[in-house]
Image (tube, grey):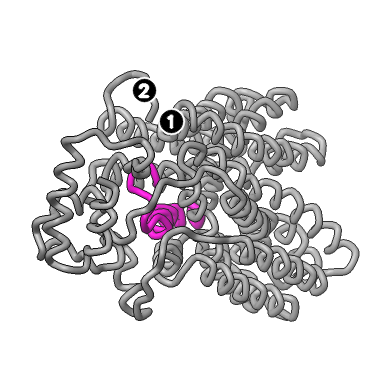
Amino acid sequence: MISTWSLCLHQTQRHQGCMMLSSTIATQMRLPRPRNCSLSRRPLVGSKVDQLLAHDDDEEEVDLTGETASLHDLPTPAPDGGLSAILVVVASFLVNFTTLGIQYSFGIYQKYLPNAEFKGRATAAEVSLVGSVSFGFMYLLGVYSGRLADVYGYRRMVLAGTMIMVVGLVLAAFATELWHLMVTQGLLLGIGCSVTYFPGVAVNAQWWDRYRSLATGIAVAGAGAGGLAVANGSEALLNSVGLKWTLLITALATLILQLVAVALLKTRFPTRSRPLREALSNAIDWQLFKTRAFPPLIIGVFLNPFGYLIPYYFIPSYCQAQGLASTSGAMLLTVINITSVVGRIAVGFLADRWGNVNCYFASTMFAAISCLGIWLWTAAIPGLVVFAAVFGFCCGGLASLMPSVTAQLFGTKGLATSIGLIYSAEAVGHLAGPPLAALLIRDDSPLPSRGYAGLIAYAGAFSLVAGMCLAYVRYAVLDRTVWKKL
């Protein structure tokens, strides 16, 4: 049986091979398959392989020599361990450390620039556009970055993104006007982070199945670790050597860490190069929208950043409005970042036992509850620390589980394309979420949160609605059972 299966795989580019494959699959569906030749776990919905099996006798509907539908690329089971798989996690950790570490640390520049190099020449709101453009373009271009990685190779894209990031940071070091920073530290850095980040996150799913969520959680914990390290390092450097040398040192550190990641990164799936125009024209996999799970999932992903970004942006000003110590805001952000690192690993560990979709849904709902049930009703440090810990832990789960949820629902083949498309939906929230929330700040309120009550309710409401979209995926699309590992 194994030899017949192998023969069929090598004959998929011939019309005769299609007929042999159809009969072989039919035979294997009737007979029990030996344990040692089982394939990787199939995605729950929307699998290209499932579509292929369903239409193996329709030559016009299935392109057996095409890049995304070729049975020649059917993966063997993920190794779930071994040196290569572990090194891939290390590479992904480094990618998260540099890309999101730099993005999460922009608040340091936000505080520094209006009072130093651009004092009197740019307002805080104008400076914030640099960070918004960078973070927004990182996610907005995800649909193209993921597609290019699937076509041209993950390692090539990470290397290309590294070069773009370094060029952006080096040019930013010589900026004399704010618009120079918009182009370099904003646009170029954002493009480079996008090209690097999505293949760096997606690659873990090729090597891990049973422990996929834990492996991804460890990898994306690099974002929280990077946020702490880059923010503290940038603040120290800005105060000692100034903007120019801070950016140059950041560029050098980025180059070194990313080159290590490129050296360690390895993929299991072959790539089929295509002309750039053709690759970009097929960046959006419209077949995903025909599945029942994808539309509500991407709506939930679209809504989530409108809610979960708010504490990151407004906790410091909230503490100032409450008359708390000047260090309270920084302390609470540190709590959020530390518990986020813990959450990325811990929730990934739990997801391997309880299910990716279950834990992703729970993380979203508890993030909403932490805003509406804790933050809205407290103005004291102990209560705010509890909120920061719960919220950070839940946000860590959101960050670590999205790649695993996507792989589980839609398959690992072309995963960077799928993840890039999903994360592109977050771009609007990153660009518009915080400015819209700021409009809800009032002078006073009868609640303990005072003038920030509307802003906090806004954050919690968006997270709650996003959680309802995920509840629909879990209970209406996948399984109505109250508790089942999914």
Would residue 295 appear left or right of 421 to someone viewing this image? Answer: left
Amino acid identity at mark 2? Lys
Q: Could you say where residue 393 lies in the image, as x and y percent from the top left?
A: 61, 33
Task: Give the labeled residue for mark 2.
Answer: 484
Predominant SS of the magenta segment? helix
- Residue 247 at x, y = what percent? 76, 70
Q: Nearer the viewer, residue 238 or 454?
A: 238
Q: Secondary structure at mark 2?
A: loop
Give neighbour class at mark 1: few <14, some 14-19, many 20+ (Cα, 10 Å): many
Asked whether disc 1 touches disc 2, contact meaning CB atoms under 8 Å apart, the reply is yes
Q: Residue at image x 54%, y 44%?
A: 399
Q: Earlier in the sequence, mark 1 or mark 2?
A: 1
Q: Is residue 283 left or right of residue 207?
A: left
Whether residue 31 sits left or right of residue 316 in the image: it is left
Stretch in magenta: 407-432
Q: Which mark is residue 355?
A: 1
